[in-house]
């Protein structure tokens, strides 16, 4: 039997291990270890508008969905998120159940949209449930390289970082 409940801080250590196993099995090019996964999940957990749901199969933690609410020009959005199910429990509808409970929870809290990034495999699933590709482009830049390129393109800019 699958149970979905609010995530507890005491779940994080187990969920970090599941996150590592899930993403490393998917071969996305992301290489997680438990400590980095725990740092990410702690980051989400400590956000002011965090929503976290944990899935249990016969009382054993098997996955979760972490997200947060952000204010936007048109109302509240459920932002990004991490939906992950232990590989042993995948393709059993657990992710779909987690997703539905998250959508209902976010809707009750005033969210009107869920914005996310997805790899190709899960993107297919999201399209089946009504998501559409937007005109936004996902960009990622190595900060050191960006600094070097800006410096080489425009030497006139004073580019000192503010003192903290």
Image: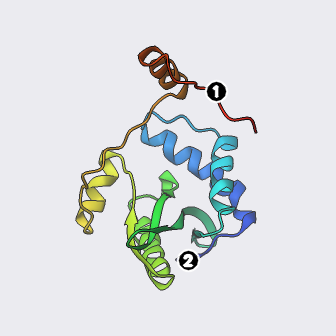
Residue 5 location (% of width, % of height): 60, 77
Q: Secondary structure at mark 2?
A: strand
Q: Residue at x 50, y 80 (%)?
A: 105
Instruction: Look at the picture and state if 20 lies above or below 77.
Output: above
Q: Residue at x 48, y 25 (%)?
A: 146
In what quadrant of the picture does the C terminus appear?
Answer: top right
Q: Residues within 10 Å of mark 1 (few under 14, many from 20)?
A: few
Q: Which residue is mark 1?
A: 160
Instruction: Look at the picture and state if 138 lies above or below 108.
Output: above
Residue 29 location (% of width, % of height): 44, 33
- Which colour scheme appears in the figure? rainbow
Q: Nearer the viewer, residue 124 or 142?
A: 142
Q: Nearer the viewer, residue 66 or 77?
A: 77
Q: Secondary structure at mark 1?
A: loop
Q: Quadrant of residue 126?
A: bottom left
Q: Residues within 10 Å of mark 2 (few under 14, many from 20)?
A: some
Residue 85 location (% of width, % of height): 50, 58
Q: Please state the total of marks drawn on the protein image.
A: 2
Is residue 18 found left or right of 75 in the rendered image?
right
Instruction: Look at the picture and state if 74 lies above or below 42.
Output: below
Residue 136 location (% of width, % of height): 30, 50
Q: Which residue is mark 2?
A: 3
């Amino acid at each position: 039997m699958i149970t979905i409940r609010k995530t507890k801080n005491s779940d994080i250590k187990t969920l970090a291990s599941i996150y590592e196993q899930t993403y490393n099995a998917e071969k996305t090019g992301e290489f997680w270890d438990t400590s980095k996964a725990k740092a990410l999940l702690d980051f989400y957990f400590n956000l002011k508008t965090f929503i976290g749901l944990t899935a249990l199969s016969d009382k054993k933690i098997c996955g979760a969905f972490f997200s947060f609410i952000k204010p936007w020009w048109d109302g509240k959005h459920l932002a990004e998120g991490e939906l992950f199910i232990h590989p042993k429990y995948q393709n059993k509808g657990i992710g779909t159940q987690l997703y539905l409970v998250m959508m209902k929870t976010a809707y009750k809290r005033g969210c009107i949209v869920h914005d996310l990034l997805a790899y190709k495999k899960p993107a297919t699933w999201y399209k089946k449930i009504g998501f559409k590709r937007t005109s936004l482009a996902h960009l990622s830049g190595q900060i050191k390289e960006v600094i070097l390129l800006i410096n080489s393109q425009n030497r006139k800019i004073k580019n000192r970082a503010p003192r903290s």
